[in-house]
Image (tube, grey):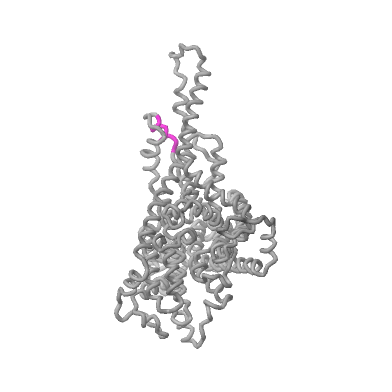
Amino acid sequence: MSAPARPAPESAETGVPRRANGPFSRSNLGATLAGGYLPLILATLVMVLPLLWMVVSSFKAPHEILSTDLVVLPEQPSLSNYEAAWNSVPIPRFFLNSVIVTTIGSSIKVLLAIFTAYALVFVRFPFKRVIFVLILVALMVPPQVSILPNYVLIAGLGGVNTYWGIILPGLGTAFGTFLLRQFFLTIPPAILEAAEIDGAGHLRTLISVVVPISVPTVATVALVTIVTEWNDYIWPLIITSEASRMTLPVGLTALSNSEGNTGSGWGILMAGTVLVIAPVLIVFAMLQRHIVSGLTQGSVTG
Amino acid sequence: MTDPSREVPGTDAPRTAASPTPGSTAGRTSPAVRRRRRMSRRSRRDALVFLAFAAPNLVLIAMFTYRPLFLNIQYSMLDWTLGSRTATFIGLDNYREFFTSDAGLESLRITAIFTLFTVGGAMVLGLLIAVALNIDVPGRGLARSAVFAPYVLSGVGVGLVWLFIFDPNFGVLGWILRQVGLNSPDWFLDPEMSLVMLIIVYVWKNLGYCAIVYLGGLQSLSQDVMQAAQLDGAGAVRRFVSIALPLLSPTTFFLLITTTLNSLQAFDLLRIMTPTGRGTNTMIFESYLQAFGGYSRAGYSATISVLLFVILIVMTVAQILFVERKVHYA
């Protein structure tokens, strides 16, 4: 089959896959590489290389980091930075604290979001619309604006350097409620009527009818909540001063204050950074579709 | 966004329809009264269910999101050292200080520069990458993930990675500059260069969001229009500039608002990369530094928070107005 005389990039754009005219056919290979792959590879490298550098550096010996010549790969990759991070600061403790705060915090948040969204959509109540608008407005309030009054309150209650002090102020969830409500609205009423005729109360309906058909949306909310909670910084930073309660980002800040900018600590810092970044990266790699859709929700298609 | 005014009809239907039970009405009250009474009993029970389900979340939001907003206004009129039991009411003096002092105006200037360049940078680069991602070649899914990944990573982690890269003595960037005979700028000590560094890193971390949203916009463009233009002899560049860009304007406007809001709230990178905030003290960072950075000036910090919130509200209202417009647009 003689390839049509159409110029290559256009066939790539209109995107009807035809073997003889595919992106890798002889006539298109050059154009595909230049027009399609070069920008993609460039973009990917710019995004991936810094993270790769972090990982590689975390395995380097101090003299390889402190060298003014570039040492790309460590001669003898070693875990000594991880060991040093492990021994010099309570990194396992930070990690454990992050896990505790993230697990408890996001479990409660997801539950609260499910119950609130169900109430807003399926239970009769006056002023529901007003309540929903108030939740929407709360979505727009950045947590940074509320830290000072919250600090005064929580510190007054003795919540400094406690798990509940870290978790409590962030528990109210406008984001999850909003996302789940939007999904619940799309559930056909007939399904709920059937449950009601069967004599199911609201709790039964919620648990055995609504949640099972909302699993993808609940998963999206859960993932975004977990990632946000894991990365959360400003509040744990303010409410903790003892290493025993610091989360990983706060602990890294302390480590950076003591080791950073001197040079010698970079390897250790990169090892600690791997610990805060890698879990999210792994979760993202496995479940990115949910995370991306959750984070770009309400943007274009809506 | 789905229309928030939509309600699910008929969830109450079955019982309402079944409530007047004919035949068994041999009572003292008329069916209508009985029905109303049963309805009110039912709606009272519904109200209780609603409260049991929603109240915990609503109370938390009220306590930790709304209460601080109002308290900030109160705090902002105080001369109050954080931790002190006494405070002096000073009216609007804090606001006067912000708008007349060098430090306050500097913070406004830095906020404006940071927001302008991060929004512009992330959107322009995001659009270019979206165009690259929109070309249908195998393996673009991987590139898509790579581009979006930094957006979900910890700001502290990303900040540390880049601090190491920017380190004038041991960083990769300094090494590259030395290879071409340049000296590394003092990213950490020169306030202007610190701001440049932060803008670069912030754009790197956030352009994936713009790219993915733009990609969604590009993919929803009508192929008919593009092909018609192609048949009329419009080249790829011409099609992009004259057709795709105007059609993407709702996406552009949406991104303009959301990325501006995000940039105004940027904190993690600023705090980890420039702990003392010299040259990088945007309003949100300045507010933090004033209260928690050693000054303990709670009243002044709250003042900056109030001002920032006013700015955010203005942007949000703009967004709501835009969403209205977008509905008619599409």
| Point 62% across, 67% down: residue | B107
Above or below — where is A180 with respect to A45? above
Residue A81 visible? yes
**Among the 4 quarters of the image, the one containing residue B158:** bottom left
Q: Position of residue A223 (x, y in %)?
A: 40, 54
- Magenta-drawn stretch contains B261: no
Q: Horizontal placement of A270 versus B120: left or right?
A: left
What type of secondary structure mainly makes up the magenta span? helix
Above or below — where is A185 with respect to B239? above
Q: Where is residue B65 in the image (x, y as percent from the top left)?
A: 54, 50
Q: Position of residue B13 (x, y in %)?
A: 47, 29
In front of the other: B295 or B222: B295
Q: Position of residue B217 (x, y in %)?
A: 51, 58
In front of the other: B22 or B83: B83
Above or below — where is B204 with respect to A129? below
| Point 49% across, 86% down: residue | B180
Residue B234 visible? no
Total marks shown come to 0
| Point 42% across, 61% down: residue | A246
Residue extending furthest bottom?
B181
Q: Horizontal placement of A121 versus B313: left or right?
A: left
**Among the 4 quarters of the image, the one containing residue A26:** bottom left
| Point 42% across, 32% down: residue | A193
Tell me which segment is drawn in magenta: A188-196
- Magenta-drawn stretch contains A190: yes
